């Protein structure tokens, strides 16, 4: 088909998505045409000889500038390789006069010759490797200069999660490692002397002792009381690193305390953001730590005063001599037992248990003390 479809544009302009290009050796010479093909050859590309020129199809479409392309750029549209952009009417006219043949890898080629579209026929696949002259090449046998060194792999540093989270060492792990080393283990529990030493000097780590491996208790209560540090980075004044506090309550209480000082002192409040330091830090930490205890004691005293004195207790109080506490020995004994249980749970780091039982024991003793005070007021008791 020649002279039937005359496109208004004879070549692509600007930057286009090119599927390949077609080069006529008559324009640049056979040697230059081959050098251009080899320079743009890639894995997956294909070469055809058609209409006296070389048609190079890229492995994948790419953006090319038409004004500096090494040959005539070809774009693809519905299975056609077009050397010029076509309008819709020109595209329909091409389809009407040139049926598809699919000679070039399932595609058809439309070139522009003398201002008209030319549908190329008779395409043949070419092998560009035959253009390479390897007769003067000299083959050389390769020989290794030595053993290939293995690639150095950076060792991943081991992270002790327990130490990072400030968690005591696992006694089960210590016993397992001791068994792997063939050491004899003792199932005897730590003595009171070891418990006392661990309470003051314990690090929470496993240590080797005579008869086996034991884990020293951590002096957690001293850490809570004396190691009251303030970190940097808090959004609210005083609300610093949460990991420095034993509980959320302590962190929030400290935040309210510092915020109150800031409101009272204004610009005179000059605590650095990274901490207090010195004796001031200790006393503030001690005050914040004791505030909830004092509030709990006050609440227990209020609750104890709200409990009415039973009639039989009132009669007994009025008739009893001044050392009336002896008649309530079972009640005092119960409070002492609860406090002992509190100490044991505190020793074994069970915070919620010892706090609950301590509150119950303090409530019983406060109730007893309130009744003892009311014993001195017979009128109120009788009422």
Image (tube, rainbow, N blue to C red):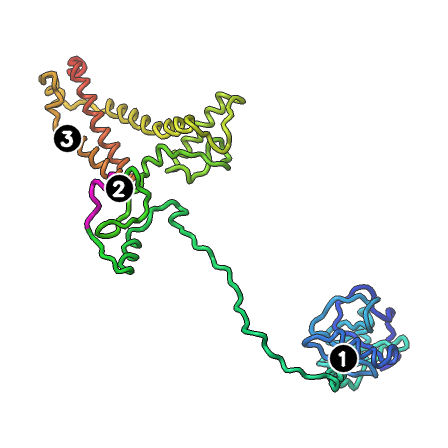
Is-magenta flag for residue 189? yes
The residue that disc 3 covers is: 333
Residue 186 is inside the magenta segment: no
State the residue position of label 2: 348
Is residue 187 or residue 288 the one in the foreground? 187
Sequence-wise first label, 1 or 3: 1
Residue ranking furthest to the front: 145
Distance from disc 3 to disc 2, alpha carbons, whole Å, reads 23 Å
Task: Please report the residue visible at 51 percent of the width from the left and 25 percent of the height from the top.
Answer: 270
Check residue 35 in the rendering and tell me which mark sits there, or answer none. none
Residue count near mark 3 (Cα–Cα under 10 Å), binned few <14, some 14–19, many ≥20? few
- Magenta residues, start to end: 188-197
* Residue 314 position by quadrant: top left
Q: CA distance from mark 1 to mark 3?
A: 106 Å
- Residue 367, given in percent of the width and then of the height, sits at 21, 25
**Residue at the image point whose x is 73% and y is 79% from the top:** 107
């Amino acid at each position: 088909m020649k002279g039937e479809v005359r496109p208004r544009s004879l070549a692509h302009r600007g930057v286009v998505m090119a599927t390949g290009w077609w080069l006529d050796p008559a324009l640049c010479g056979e040697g230059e045409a081959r050098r251009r093909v080899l320079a743009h050859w890639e894995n997956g590309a294909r070469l055809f000889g058609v209409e006296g020129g070389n048609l190079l199809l890229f492995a994948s479409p790419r953006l090319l500038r038409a004004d500096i392309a090494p040959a005539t750029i070809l774009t693809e549209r519905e299975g056609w390789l077009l050397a010029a952009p076509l309008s819709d009417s020109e595209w329909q006219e091409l389809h009407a006069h040139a049926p598809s043949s699919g000679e070039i890898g399932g595609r058809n080629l439309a070139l522009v010759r003398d201002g008209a579209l030319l549908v190329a026929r008779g395409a043949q696949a070419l092998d560009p490797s035959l253009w390479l002259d390897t007769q003067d090449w000299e083959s050389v046998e390769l020989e290794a200069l030595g053993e290939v060194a293995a690639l150095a792999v950076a060792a991943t540093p081991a992270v002790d999660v327990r130490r990072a989270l400030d968690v005591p060492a696992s006694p089960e792990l210590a016993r397992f490692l001791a068994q792997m080393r063939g050491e004899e283990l003792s199932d005897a529990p730590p003595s009171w002397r070891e418990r006392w030493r661990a309470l003051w000097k314990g690090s929470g780590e496993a240590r080797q002792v005579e008869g086996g491996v034991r884990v020293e208790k951590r002096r957690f209560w001293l850490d809570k009381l004396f190691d009251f540090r303030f970190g940097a980075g808090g959004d609210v004044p005083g609300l610093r690193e949460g990991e420095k506090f034993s509980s959320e309550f302590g962190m929030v209480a400290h935040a309210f305390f510092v915020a109150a000082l800031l409101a009272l002192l204004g610009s005179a409040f000059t605590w650095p953001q990274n901490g207090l330091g010195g004796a001031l830090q200790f006393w503030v930490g001690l005050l914040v730590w004791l505030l909830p205890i004092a509030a709990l004691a006050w609440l227990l005293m209020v609750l104890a005063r709200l409990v009415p004195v039973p009639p039989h207790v009132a009669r007994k109080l009025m008739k009893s001599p001044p050392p009336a506490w002896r008649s309530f020995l079972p009640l005092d004994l119960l409070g002492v037992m609860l406090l002992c249980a509190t100490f044991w749970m505190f020793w074994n780091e069970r915070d919620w248990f010892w706090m609950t039982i301590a509150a119950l024991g303090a409530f019983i003793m406060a109730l007893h003390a309130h009744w003892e005070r009311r014993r001195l007021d017979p009128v109120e008791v009788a009422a």
